[in-house]
Every structure is written in structure tokens, then in C-alpha cells.
Image (cartoon, rainbow, N blue to C red):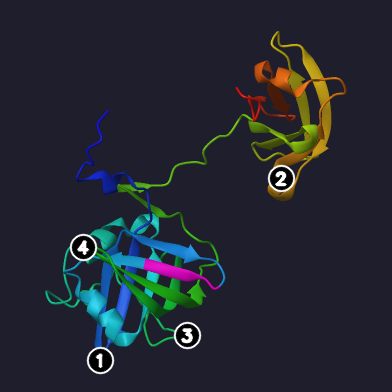
């Protein structure tokens, strides 16, 4: 292990390539921006981070708006092309792979064929030591009836694999004031009743049932459970909690707040 920061550490990030479109004074440009994100929910904001040599940034600032399309997996070649040339090199919109959609809330067109495209009003420019972040409020969104799978950038460009398979409950437990045991847990999504069974395990693994509890918001578990009568809280340091749900492997946790 080392404390040094590798120069290519940023490539460890996984993201979806954005195709940023900027339009002003008769010039329309499309460029690739690996760092394209949604950064606020209400109102919805999109952020794109551009390098110091990107002419697109100057166009965005002059226009006060931009659009960004999050690439679909079949747009890898287009993402590479749009990131390889500047608007000062060539008019990239002449490529037959770049099909522009008509704007509805701004004057800036958007690249079709992606997972989603949004039209944004520029709200803030954030200078960074090298790059610049452009924050835009989303004024219109263009979502295909059947959104394609996203292009995934993780060093190289990848297609998206299958869903990550979750099989086990993940749990945590904390001793709260008044002798209450707070238990939190998540687990794989299941059909049917969302009921969680909680047991307290002593040092020998002998269980003491703490009841069955319904799911909280988002089908997770968050519950405060009274400790069994006569159980001294100072003895909990050698106990564990197990949380079970039908169809998933049980989750085990220690108990914080007990001096463990």
C-alpha cells in the first residue's frame, strides 16, 4: 500500500460518457465529457466537467446553456470521435453518426440515440485547479420509449453487464438510550411480505428472539427493539445480532455503543 496518488487514479471511476452539445452564434459543437452527472434532484441539475483546452466551455458560457446526452452502449465509436477533435479542427456535426434533435426549452440541440438527453440552462461555472465544472438546471428531458443500455467508462469503454446479484442481508446494530436496540438492515429485493426476523446471539451463539418486524421505507429495516427483561446492557459487548429474511442469507452484526 502507498499514500501516493497515482496520476491515472481518475480512470478508476466508473461513469457514463456524456455528449455535450453547445450552440452559439451559428456554431454547434459536440464533444465527449466522461465526467457528466446529475448532481441535484429538485430542481434537477446536470454537471459536466471540461478541460482547459475545450472550446465547448467558451461556447457554453457565451450561450448560457447546453445539452448533454448520456451515451448508449452502441455509441462508443461516436464518443471516441467526439472526444478526439476540437470544434477548431472540424465541424463534427457533419458526421452521419451525429443526429441532432430539435430543442424544446432552449436554443441548443441535443444528440439523439442515448439513454437520456437533457437541455440545461447554465446556472453556475465552478473553476477547478485545472478543469471547469458547468452546472445547468434541466429544463427539458428526452427519454426514448425503450431506453438502451448505457455505455460504461471505466478506463476503457465497456458495455453494461447483468445486475449485481445480491444474496445476503447486511445489518448493523446500535445500543440506544433507554435500553433500546436499534437494528438496520438491507437485503435483496424479494416478492411477497417484507418481514425481518431479528435474534440476539450470546457468546455461545444461543439465540434470543427479538421478534419479526415489517419493512420500513424503501423495503429496508430500521427498528428500535426493547432488550429482553433482565439483560444487562454491559453484557452485550460479547453478543451479536442476526437478521434474517426469507429467500436471503442471514446478516450478522456486532453491537456498537457497548464498549466493544
* Labels 1, 3: front one: 1
Q: Is 191 or 63 nearer to us in this picture?
A: 63
- Visible in this render: residue 155? no
Q: Would residue 91 appear left or right of 234 to someone viewing this image?
A: left
Magenta stretch? 43-47
Q: Residue furthest left?
A: 89
Q: Circle 1 sits on which residue? A: 25
Cα–Cα gap, marks 1 and 4: 27 Å
* Labels 1, 4: front one: 4
CB under 8 Å between discs 4 and 2: no
Quadrant (top left, top right, bottom left, bottom right) of the C terminus: top right
Q: Sequence order check: which comes first, mark 1 or mark 3?
A: 1
- Helix, strand or loop for disc 1: loop
Q: Residues within 10 Å of mark 3 (few under 14, many from 20)?
A: few
Q: Position of residue 256 (x, y in %)?
A: 63, 29
Q: Residue furthest top?
A: 204
Query: Taking 222 as reference, is 119 above or below it?
Result: below
Query: Taking 193 as reference, is 99 above or below it?
Result: below
Q: Sequence order check: which comes first, mark 3 or mark 2?
A: 3
Q: Circle 2 sits on which residue? A: 219
Cα–Cα gap, marks 4 and 2: 43 Å
Q: Position of residue 152 (x, y in %)?
A: 37, 50
Q: Would residue 29 appear left or right of 144 to someone viewing this image?
A: left
Q: Circle 4 sits on which residue? A: 130
Quadrant (top left, top right, bottom left, bottom right) of the N terminus: top left
Residue 104: mark:
3
* Labels 4, 2: front one: 4
Amino acid at each position: 500500500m502507498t499514500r501516493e496518488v497515482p496520476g491515472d487514479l481518475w480512470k478508476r471511476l466508473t461513469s457514463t460518457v456524456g455528449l455535450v452539445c453547445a450552440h452559439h452564434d451559428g456554431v454547434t459543437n459536440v464533444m465527449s465529457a466522461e465526467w457528466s452527472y446529475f448532481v441535484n434532484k429538485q430542481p434537477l441539475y446536470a454537471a459536466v466537467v471540461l478541460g482547459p483546452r475545450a472550446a465547448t466551455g467558451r461556447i457554453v458560457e457565451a450561450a448560457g446553456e447546453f445539452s448533454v446526452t448520456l451515451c448508449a452502449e452502441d455509441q462508443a465509436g461516436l464518443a471516441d470521435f467526439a472526444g478526439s477533435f476540437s470544434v477548431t479542427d472540424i465541424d463534427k456535426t457533419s458526421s452521419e453518426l451525429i443526429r441532432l434533435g430539435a430543442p424544446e426549452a432552449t436554443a441548443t440541440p441535443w444528440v439523439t440515440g442515448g439513454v437520456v438527453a437533457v437541455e440545461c440552462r447554465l446556472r453556475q461555472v465552478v473553476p477547478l485547479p485545472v478543469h471547469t465544472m458547468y452546472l445547468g438546471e434541466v429544463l427539458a428531458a428526452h427519454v426514448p420509449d425503450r431506453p438502451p443500455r448505457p455505455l460504461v467508462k471505466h478506463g476503457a469503454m465497456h458495455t453494461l453487464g447483468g445486475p449485481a446479484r445480491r444474496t445476503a442481508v447486511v445489518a448493523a446494530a446500535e445500543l440506544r438510550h433507554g435500553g433500546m436496540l436499534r437494528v438496520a438492515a438491507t437485503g435483496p429485493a424479494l416478492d411477497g411480505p417484507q418481514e425481518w426476523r431479528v435474534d440476539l446471539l450470546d457468546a455461545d451463539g444461543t439465540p434470543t428472539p427479538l421478534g419479526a418486524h415489517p419493512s420500513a421505507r424503501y423495503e429496508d429495516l430500521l427498528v428500535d427493539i426493547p432488550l429482553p427483561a433482565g439483560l444487562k446492557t454491559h453484557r452485550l459487548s460479547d453478543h451479536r445480532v442476526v437478521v434474517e429474511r426469507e429467500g436471503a442469507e442471514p446478516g450478522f452484526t456486532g453491537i456498537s455503543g457497548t464498549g466493544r
